[in-house]
Amino acid sequence: MTARSCAAVRADTAAGHVKAADTLTAAIDRAREVGAGREGLNIFAWRDDDDARRQAATIGDRLADTTPGALLGVPVAVKDNIATLTMPTTCGSRILEGYVSPYEATVVKRLREAGGIVFGKTNMDEFAMGSSTENSAYGPTKNPIAPDRVPGGSSGGSAAAVAAGIVSIALGSETGGSVRQPAAFCGIVGVKPTYGRVSRFGLVAFASSLDQVGVFGHTVDDAARGLGAIAGHDAMDSTSADIAVPDYTAGANADVKGLVVGLPKEYFPASLDPAIRAKCDAAIEHLRALGATVKEVSLPHTDLAIPVYYIIAPAEASSNLARFDGVRYGLRLSGDGLRGMYEATRSGGFGPEVTRRILLGTYVLSAGYYDAYYRKAQQVRTLIANDFRRVFDSGVHVLFTPTAPSTAFPIGAISDPYEMYLSDIFTATANLAGVPAMSIPIGRIGGLPVGGQFLASHFDEARMFNAAYALERALGAEAHA
Amino acid sequence: MTSPVSKSTLEKWEMVVGLEVHVQLKTRTKLFCACSAEFGAQPNANTCPVCLALPGALPVVNKAAVGLATRASLALNCEVQPVSIFARKNYFYPDLPKGYQISQYDKPLALDGWVEIGARADGSPIRIGVTRVHMEDDAGKSIHDRFPGVTAVDLNRSGVPLIEIVSEPDIRSAEQAGAYLRVLKQILEYVDVSDLNMEEGSLRVDANVSARRRGESKFGTKTEVKNMNSFSGVERALEVEFARHVSVLEAGGVIEQQTMLWDGSTVRPARSKEGSHDYRYFPDPDLPPLILDLQWIEKARHDLPELPAARRARFASEYRLGDYDVEVLTASPRLADYYESVARAHGEPKAAANWVMGEVMATLKTSGEDISRFRVRPADLAALLGLVRDGVVSHTAAKQIFAHMVATGDQPAQIAEREGLVKVDDDAQLSAWLDEVIAENPNEAERFRNGEKRLQGVLVGAVMKKSKGRADPRKLNQLLTTRLTS
């Protein structure tokens, strides 16, 4: 069972057929049915149903508005690293235990203005560092499709909330695939917009030059509507782009005749799981049958993405996470003097993966190592971005690839950090290059979902959605079989 | 620790100094958020998610601060860079909420400037190079003495915009350091970018000092001296630290590169070693490069006000004032503006200079007021000077009128009338006063009549007093001579 689509809820709410409060009650009931709580799927870091009901109660007042908001009456789950006023924002970390933001993220403000209802804060890998949602102070989230398996990460809670049918839309965040990979693992749609498309104001920073708020939807249409509601320039974020936001649903019924789809050969290595390759091949056949031109292309620096990512992201994180020092908010543990307090608070507050990345990042920025690591990584990052530019400049409209090298793995199966990092092998490139990308379900292997990824050039989300809508339509039930 | 060094030993060594001057820009709001940048509010009143570094908050550059920093850079003859980059300087301290300061590192706002601090014996100018000017945000303030046993943090200052002006190591004496600072301060005051108040911390000076044997071209190891709270403090600290260097070096020791703190009479090493910090600078990913349009920079250059050197030259030629008068009247742009307004309205620059440097400055010195708030407007002072020139009031009466103007802000003519200070040159009235004075001082009158000329002053003075300064002295003297010597 799935949550009612965003479009249907909005239409019914605007027409007065359905009350926002009833839609919300259905979500609350569904959460209970699937066992979303701590002992069950452990989807949420925090839920406040009374607060959600208060939000829903105000929706009726807005029915007189000339244009109903794009998310009118739609419950939306929000990742725990996005600042909300009425619920804590803890990034799945002990260091922010009980922290309630006195201000609200721009994306949350926009989704509320669009008529959406903030429905709980979702579990995540601590500070978004992880690919399985196992690195959380609240314990791991379980994949609703196969509860012994991970939902992917770091936005695993948001992905699970949609996959479990509690909500049709959820907000996540991406630094290296943290929306697309869990979307693939949970059999739903996940979008990472162009860097600068969505405001980061109120998104707790992991790696500022890579971070973007992303959207999960049960369908391409849900995701398109969710992104449309939160995208656009924000004066509070100097890296947000002042570029008009098109209607991402405009291509819902358009065909893909003449669309040039590139298949980057580096994303289909010989080592790729043959079953995943077969699902991709089937999807590609559909695109071809729909009239798209499919051709092989090359992004030669792809294999450098993971090493570069694991220099740049930890470097920025080591600085971004310096503010969690026990002085102003969050956890404070006492120690001997100021230094002792810092050490006790940060050692006690951060989990092992966060600690590892802070140490990595501190190291690569140190005097004497900066040029060899950080500066070099930035240079290689430029090469990766140029790979994409070259391909898109050659007339390719979108790229199609597998989203992840595997399906959802069992909880606890991967203990080697480096093996875990390879989960992001097909996704980290889009964050490094800043281009938009999305994952949609293209079938299942042994009951486990497989995701196919579309990538487009900067701010060309509309074309990417067009391709995704068409493929989703062509796949039909095959997407979940 | 170090033995005192004789003057002759000191003279064998040369002081090498570079100064780092932090100047708080006079913006309404902070560098990266909309909080008030005003000094003196209740602790932590001027804070928001951005300057408190709450999770998820992001910086947005204040354009007004960029404007002021650009203006300062241009006034210091720097080349303003079309692209500069904000970087993060990472370190932990309770009053640094983000865990990093946003500064500019390898791509600062401006490079390669200079200021002229005087001339050598041969007349060639002494120029001190300005290496760079960069923008950065200030930290908050740790307060250790307010609550027993704990440190309090006030983040009102967190995020306030600063520029750091870094000089070349061109300074060769404590005196030159003082001259550089005074010239720098005067220029910045002219371009009106800062309050420049050392007590409130809107102007801070750190000094890098080293010693080398005279004739040596290589620099010695430097130490950084901090915590000076006046220009004369900087000069004294440099003398003391330089003497310490010489003493150590003369004894065959080595100077350790470290930070020293000035306590008003001596220097001592700072507790934490500044040199051991690794700030892990990297470009701030939250802020795109600061790109300045070339036309915008040129407009800023065009809009610069007249700078001190140009104004001094113009005062000398336009108003034909001597060096001393020029120096005094151009000390601050507000004083210079005031003087110019008086001089232009009155038409006699020298008389205007005498009054501004005399009565006006004396009054301000007594009251401690700034000239920008002075009650006597330039036009009114010019009117008073006009009354003196036209013989309507005497010089003595003018001083009394001026005192009334300071107290009431009224017009001089009105005061002269009201207080009966208009000059009296009417023969009958003058004769009547003179008769009274002669009658009251028969002895002096008699001696004057008998040729004791110096008593003329006593008698005239008595009449002036009786007339409350109104008697026309020229006429009075004539009358007295006629009455008592003919």
Image: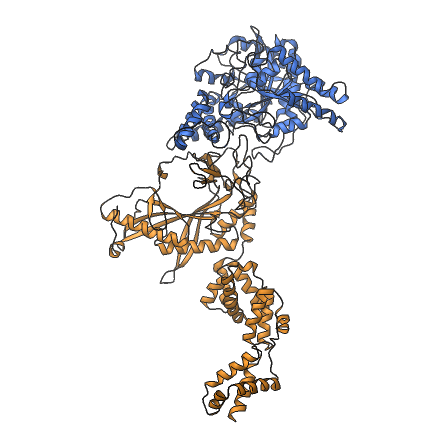
Chain colours: A blue, B orange
Give how far across and how far down residue A408 sits, in percent: 53, 11
Q: Residue furthest front?
A: B440
B223 is higher (above) or lower (below) than A323: below
Pick the quarter of the image with the N terminus of chain B.
top left
Question: As rendered, which of B248 and B396 lies closer to the eye?
Answer: B396
Q: Is residue A40 left or right of residue A25?
A: left
Q: Quadrant of residue A29?
A: top right
Question: As rendered, which of A278 and B118 lies closer to the eye?
Answer: B118
Give how far across and how far down residue A189 sits, in percent: 61, 17
Q: Is residue B224 left or right of residue B216?
A: right
Q: Is residue A114 left or right of residue A171?
A: right
Give how far across and how far down residue A171 sits, in percent: 60, 22
Q: Quadrant of residue B423?
A: bottom right
At 60% from the left and 65% from the top, the residue drawn is B408
Q: Residue furthest bottom?
A: B486
B359 is higher (above) or lower (below) than A56: below
Is residue A475 among what the camera can see?
yes
Q: Residue furthest left?
A: B252
At 54% from the left and 87% from the top, the residue drawn is B439
At 64% from the left and 70% from the top, the residue drawn is B414
Is residue A295 among what the camera can see?
no
